[in-house]
Amino acid sequence: MDYISRLSFKSEVESVQVAISGKFYAISAAAAVIKHIELHYNIGFVGHSLRIRYQSSEGAMVIDFSTVQNLELIQNLRNPKSGDCLLGLLNNTVTPMGGRLLRSSILQPLTDTSILKDRLDAVEEMATSEEMFFGTKKALQGFGDMDKLLTSLITVPVNSSLKFSEKSINDVILLKKELASITPIHEALVGCGSKLLLAVRSLCSFDKFQTVQDLIDEAISPDAVWASTPVDLRHQRCYAVKSGVNGLLDVARQTYKEATEDLHVLFQEISREYNLPALEIKYDSQRGYYLRLPVADIEDAPLPPTFVNIMKKKKFVECTTLDIMKRNARIGDAMTEVLLMSDRTIQDLIDAIRGEMFALYKVCEGVAMLDMISSFATLVTLYEYTRPEFKNNLAIKDGRHPIREKIHKEKLIPNDVYASQQTRFQIITGCNMSGKSTYIRQIALMTIMAQIGSYVPASYACFPLITHLFARVSMDDGIEANVSTFAAEMRETAFILKNATEGSMVIMDELGRGTCTRDGLAIAIAVCEALIEKQAFVWFATHFRELGAVLSRRVGVISLHMQVEMRPDQNLTSMLYKIADGPATEKHYGINLARIIGLPQTIIIRASEVSNTIAKNAELKRMTSKGYRKYERQRLVLQLVEHLKQARGSKMTNMALKGWLGRLQAEFVEAMANLKDADEESESSESENDETNTTTVTTTEGNSRESGIGSGDVDAMDTSSDGTPILMPSEQDSEEEEEETTETTGAIESSDTDGYSGWSGFTTTNSHSNPYSYGSEDTRKSGSDTVDEEMESAGYVSNTFNSGDLLEGIEELSDVEDQI
C-alpha cells in the first residue's frame, strides 16, 4: 500500500486506495513487481508519476492459457512467425499502442454490452465514412510508441550517467514530435458522431496537452526535431536546448561545432592527397567518424600507409587515420561538455512534465483505442463481415472460420449455428476431415471477435455474453512436461469441469480418443452429463455415435453432423463441409477412407466383416428394447412441441407456414409409425418364442440354479458367437421400467465376443428426476399409448393436413408438454 500511495498520481491516490481495500494478494503482487524492477533493473520511479488502476476480471471473459493455444488466438501452433492466427487477422494497427490494446482485448474480451455497443458504433461509422477512415489512417501513421516514451520519462536510474543524459534529451525531442502528431488525429475526427469517437477526439484536443507543449517550447529549440540517423540525432541533442538559456552551454556548443568542421576539412585533404574521389566519411555511435571507399577502387593499388584499423566488407573497405581519431576525441569531449550542461535544463523540464503526465496517459489510451477501431474498420472493407448483436441465444447465419477465410477465401463453405437453452449442448459427428473441428472452432473465434467489438464473418450473428471460454481441442503430447496425450486431455478436462458455469462456452474435440474405446466412451458420457448439468453452451465433436443416442433424451441436447457424399464403388468420398440435423448416418466411413488412401484390399475386406458383425449385434439389441421405443416417442413429442412454439411466433407467410407445418407433420407421423411397426414386430417375435422359451427354461433350470441364475433371468440371457452368455434386459425388467418412469443415465455395458461388443441396455434412476416422465400414477397409462391418444385428440397424427387445426392445437399440445 505504501508503494501505491507514494507512486500513484495525487489526484487518483484516494480512489485507488478505496478500490484495492481488502485486495491483499493484488497489493502484495504489485509491491513485489515494483521491488523487482528496482533491485534487478536498477530503476526507480519518481513519486506520484504512475497511473495505477485496479482492474477486476468481472467485466471481461476469462480465457485460460490452454484455450489461447488451442484456438491459436495469438500465435499459430505450426509456425509461430506466421500471421495465420486471430491476432494476425485482426491486427491492422499502425501504432505499437494499438497493437498491444488489440492483443490484450483478444485475451480478455469484454462482457459489458454498453461498451461493446459503443465500439461497434465507432467501427460502423469509421467503415462507412471514407474521408474519416483514410484521414485517421494517415494521422496515426505519424504516431510512435508514446506509452513506452512516458514510461521512460518517469523512470530514473539509481546512479546518473552520461548515457542517461543522452537518453533524457532524446525522450524530450521525441515527446515534442509525438505532441505534434496529436493535432492531426483531432482534425481527422471532425464530424464524427459516435460516442467513442467523440471521446477520443476530446482527449486529443490541444487544450488537453497545451501545458506540456508550453513547457517544451520554453526550454527546447523550435528547430529541434527527431532524427533517425546517429549523426543527425547527435546534432539534435547538441542543439536541443534553446540558445541563451546557459552561456557556458553556448561556448561548449561552439567548441563542438569547430571540432566537427576541422574533421571535415581533414577529410577533404585526405581525399585530394591520395586522389580518392569515391572516398566517403561516415559516422556511427561506437567508432565516431571513419572513412569508407568501394572495393573496386583499390583492387589494383594498395591503401595509403596512413590508413589504419582497416576492415574489408563485401563491397566496401572501412578504415581511419590517427588524425581522424584525434578529431573524434576532441568532438567527443566537446559533446560530453554539452550534454552535462544541457542535462540540468532537461531534468528540470522533465520534472515539470511529470506533473502533467495524467493528460498524456489519457491521450495514449485514446490513440490506442482509435487505432484498434480503425483496424476493425479495415476488416469490414476487406471481408464481408456483419455487425453482431447480443441476446440470450446464439444464432449465426452463413458463419465462416475467420482464419481459414483469410487463407482460402474462395473455397470456404459457410455454416449456420443456433443454440438456445433448449439446444445448448450440441453433439457434432461426422467423417474424418469433414470439418467438425473447423466448425466448432469458428464458433469460439467469432464469439471472441464479437466481444472485443469487431464485426464477424457472417451474414447475420447474435451472441450471448460469454463469461468463460474453454477449448479442449489439442491432441499433442506434452513431451517437455512428460505428459501423455490422455493425461493432458484429462488434466484440461478436469479444469473445465471445475470452472465451467452457466455463462460459459465449452468447445471439446474428440474427448476420450486417447485411451481404449470403452473407457473413452464412458469418460465422454460422464463428462457430457456433468457439462449438461452446468448448463453451459457446449459444442462436442466426437466419433462416438453412441454418445448422441445415450444423451439424446437429456434436456438441451441435440445431435448434428457434417454432411458427406460417399461412393465406395468409385473409391470416392466428397466432403460437403455443411452442418445438418441429426447424427451422422454414414457407415464405415473410416474403412472407405482407408480404401481410398490405399490400404491393402484384404485388410479392407476383413475390417468390413468385423464392422458389419458389430453393427448387426448392436442394432438388434437396441431395437428390441421397449424402453428405447418409449423414450423415442417422448423425444419426438418434445421436439414437436418446440417446433410448434417456434411456428406460433414465426413471421412466415401463411403459405410458407402451411408448407413447413406439412413437412413437420409428415416427418412426425412417419417417425411414430416406424416406432409402432417396431412394437408390432417385437410383440410378434415374443409370441413366436413363448413356447421355445418355456422349453428352454425347463431343460436348463438345473444348470441355471447351479450357476446362480434364476429361472426368471433366463429371458435376459443371450449368447455371443462363441457361446458366451450376454445379459440382456428381460421383459419383466422393461415393464418395471415403464411403470416407474425412469430416466436414462447413459451407462452402457458391453460384452466381449471375439473383440466385438454390443448394447446391454440403460441403467435408470428414480422417477422424480426424470424430465421426460409425464402424468401422475392415476392418469398415466402405458407409456406411448398416452402420448398417441393426446396427439390424436389434438389433431396432429392425421393423414390430412390442416394448418389451422395444427396451429389451434398448440395450446393443447402445451398441456402435453406440461405433463411431460
Image (cartoon, rainbow, N blue to C red):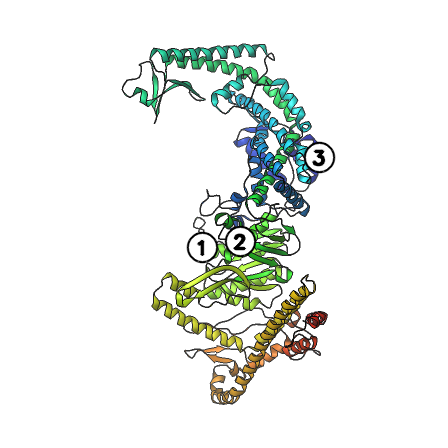
User: Label 1 sits on what residue type?
Assistant: Ser
The x and y percentages for residue 601 are 34, 67
The x and y percentages for residue 201 are 66, 34
Q: Farthest front residue?
A: 655
Whether residue 378 is visible here, answered yes or no, is yes
Whether residue 61 is visible here, answered yes or no, is no
Question: Which quarter shows the C terminus?
Answer: bottom right
Classify 292 as above or below 678.
above
Residue indicated by mark 1: 484
The x and y percentages for residue 773 are 65, 72
Q: Please state which of the two labelled residues, at mark 1 or mark 2, is closer to the viewer.
A: 2
Between 320 and 693, the one lying in front of the other is 320
Classify 775 as above or below 548.
below
Q: Please tell me how crowded label 2 is: few (under 14), some (14-19), or many (20+) other residues with Cα within 10 Å.
A: many
Dot 3 falls on a residue whose secondary structure is helix
The x and y percentages for residue 22 are 68, 42
Classify 623 as above or below 329.
below
Residue indicated by mark 3: 14
Nearer-N-terminus badge (2/3):
3
Q: Please tell me how crowded label 1 is: few (under 14), some (14-19), or many (20+) other residues with Cα within 10 Å.
A: some
Nearer-N-terminus badge (1/3):
3
The image quadrant that residue 270 belongs to is top left
Between 329 and 271, the one lying in front of the other is 271
CA gap, disc 1 to disc 2? 23 Å
Dot 1 falls on a residue whose secondary structure is loop
CA gap, disc 1 to disc 3? 51 Å
Q: Please tell me how crowded label 3 is: few (under 14), some (14-19), or many (20+) other residues with Cα within 10 Å.
A: few
Dot 2 falls on a residue whose secondary structure is helix
User: Label 2 sits on what residue type?
Assistant: Arg
Residue indicated by mark 2: 441
